[in-house]
Amino acid sequence: MCAPSVIEHVSVELSRRRFLQAAGVAAASILLPWRLAPAQAASPEAARSLSFTHVADLTHTLTPDFPVFPSFEGPKLETRYTVERDGFYARQWVVAEHTGTHLDAPAHFVAGPDMWTADQIPLENLVAPLVVVSIEERAARDHDAQVTVDDLLAWEREHGPIPKGAAVCMYSGWERRLANPVTFTNADSGGTMHFPGFSLEAAQFLVHEREVVGIGVDTLSLDIGPSTDFAVHLEVLGASKWGLENLANLATVPPAGATLIAGVPKVQGASGGPTRVLAVW
């Protein structure tokens, strides 16, 4: 999700963050004031128990006019063969990895042998307890609304601790804007986009205090639209977590109790890819 104008800034920010990570847990306990409210992790046995009666598709149908981040071209779908002419039907896709409902792998923003590409993400990290945090009302008033630590703590007061290994997803209602792609990217007269995302503090909280496997949004980016440093991407992906963008139908899923399943394409070396995402409960 990086525009050319911010690549240098991101490189500098990465160097700074690697230094801070090397400072260790002791420094983190000073920098993160919410350590006074630890969550009780769900047991591995409970996390592996799965039965369900409901299934929701959290994936948008990919079409040639689906809005994309300005760094990429829109998808191209070309019919190569038809049943009438060739005896079988097949199309050729030309699709950037970060198109439609898709997953960002750690390697999308952070270089290094320990940063997973999409095909290297462990299977157990792609099936996770689903937490849905709604900021719909705030996002209707403030197009740059962010999921905050207070939002996460409010969710916990109602539903209990965020499980260890969870996928925490923001619901802002932004998908309703897809009927008009211009309003989905929501760029102002200067070209700056405006849409909701996670705050850096919330991302730090989820990574360091709740040990999630990933986060997701129903917008174009984990970071808010005006971001130029992509601090949330760097925080989350740099901790070997994944991100899901352009999610659909989160309003149909209970805020707690569902399980997310992310079917990321297994393409060697991929930085991510269009993903079929399901929720079951």
Image (cartoon, rainbow, N blue to C red):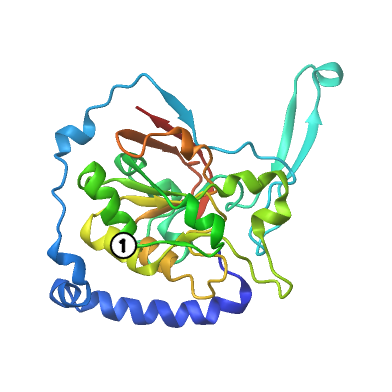
**Residue closest to the eye, 154 or 69:** 154
Query: Is residue 185 depicted above or below 248 in this figure?
Result: below
Which residue is nearer to you in this view: 160 or 98? 160
Taking the image as shown, residue 73 lies to the left or right of residue 45, namely: right
Q: Secondary structure at mark 1?
A: helix
Query: Can I make out residue 239 in this image?
Result: no
Task: Tell me where residue 205 appears, x and y as whole percent.
Answer: 27, 62
Classify 205 as above or below 135: below
At 75% from the left and 19% from the top, the residue drawn is 88
Residue at x 53% of width, y 81% of height: 8
Q: Residue furthest right?
A: 85
Q: Residue at x 30, y 55 (%)?
A: 152
Residue matched to label 1:
149
Q: Quadrant of the C terminus?
A: top left
Q: Is residue 198 visible?
A: yes
Q: Is residue 183 above or below residue 92?
A: below
Residue 27 is situated, as x and y percent measured from the top left of the image, at 17, 78
Image quadrant where residue 191 sits: bottom right
The image shows a total of numbered marks equal to 1
Quadrant occupied by the N terminus? bottom right
Point out residue 243 in the picture as x, y percentages from the top left corner. Answer: 43, 53
- Residue 262 image point, x, y percent: 43, 39
- Direction from residue 116 to residue 94 in the image, left or right: right
Instruction: Tell me which amino acid carries mark 1.
Output: Val
Q: Residues within 10 Å of mark 1 (few under 14, many from 20)?
A: some
Q: Is residue 30 above or below residue 249?
A: below
